[in-house]
Image (cartoon, rainbow, N blue to C red):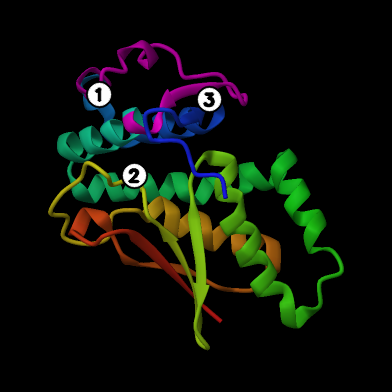
Amino acid sequence: MATSPAPVDRRVPSSVLRLILAGIRDVAGSQYGSVLSQASLSRYQSELPADDASLTITHAELSRLYATTHRVVGETLTRVFLNDYGRRFPEALLAGELGQEMLAQMKGVPESERLAKAVRLVADSGEKFSVAVDLSETSEAFFLTVRECAICAEIKNARAPVCANSEAFYGGMVRGLSGKRVTAIETECVAMGDPHCRYRIRK
């Protein structure tokens, strides 16, 4: 089985980084320049990345950007930004080529199997972003586990789970694909000292 590239080699698509930086700019306000400077990303201050699939910063640099945002604007505003970004991303993804492919795979799936199929597609889509997502389940819920989380890798001693964008993204994608009214809840988070980030989607 192929292994995921190391964080130093993984790259963030330009369209994704554009959404991330726009969200940080909205919550950071006058501190936006400081966030970019401290994250060594001042090159994006005057102009956001292009809205295309070209590759930009590494996942290690992305982790530093998130940690810098957390340090400069605080945990509450960081979570606000991440939640807003996570809510916008499913709509953008489902409108694109990858999302359309995923929707096509949902056609004809029996109602009783739609939720499981959607969760599997969302877990598998992590490969497109160089994120390994493990899927497991119990009789009551599905669990998505991210063992190397770029969001909170450099954030320590958080009071609550930090990865609000992944909660919103996983929940939004599963709803968009399955038509089921479900939510994803982060039950474990690296920023709180857990060994990985894990999300629960009840059946």
Residue count near mark 1 (Cα–Cα under 10 Å), binned few <14, some 14–19, many ≥20: some
144 on left or right of 64: right
Tell me which amino acid carries mark 1. Ala
Left or right: 64 in relation to 117: left
Q: Is residue 133 magenta?
A: no
Distance in Å between CA atoms under marks 1 and 3: 17 Å
* Residue at (16, 34) in percent of width and height: 72
Toward the bottom, the furthest residue is 139
Identify the residue position indicated by label 3 in the image.
14
Q: Up-down: is 184 above or below 150?
A: below
- What label sits on residue 39 in the rendered view? 1
Residue type marked 2:
Ile
Q: Residue at horizontal 31%, vertical 18%?
A: 41
Residue 151 circle label: 2
Q: Earlier in the sequence, mark 1 or mark 3?
A: 3
Cα–Cα gap, marks 1 and 2: 14 Å
Secondary structure beneath label 1: loop
Q: Earlier in the sequence, mark 1 or mark 2?
A: 1
Disc 3 to disc 2, how far (Cα)?
A: 17 Å
* Highlighted magenta segment, given as a residue range: 35-60
Relative image position of residue 161 (x, y in whole percent): 27, 60
Amino acid type, mark 3: Ser
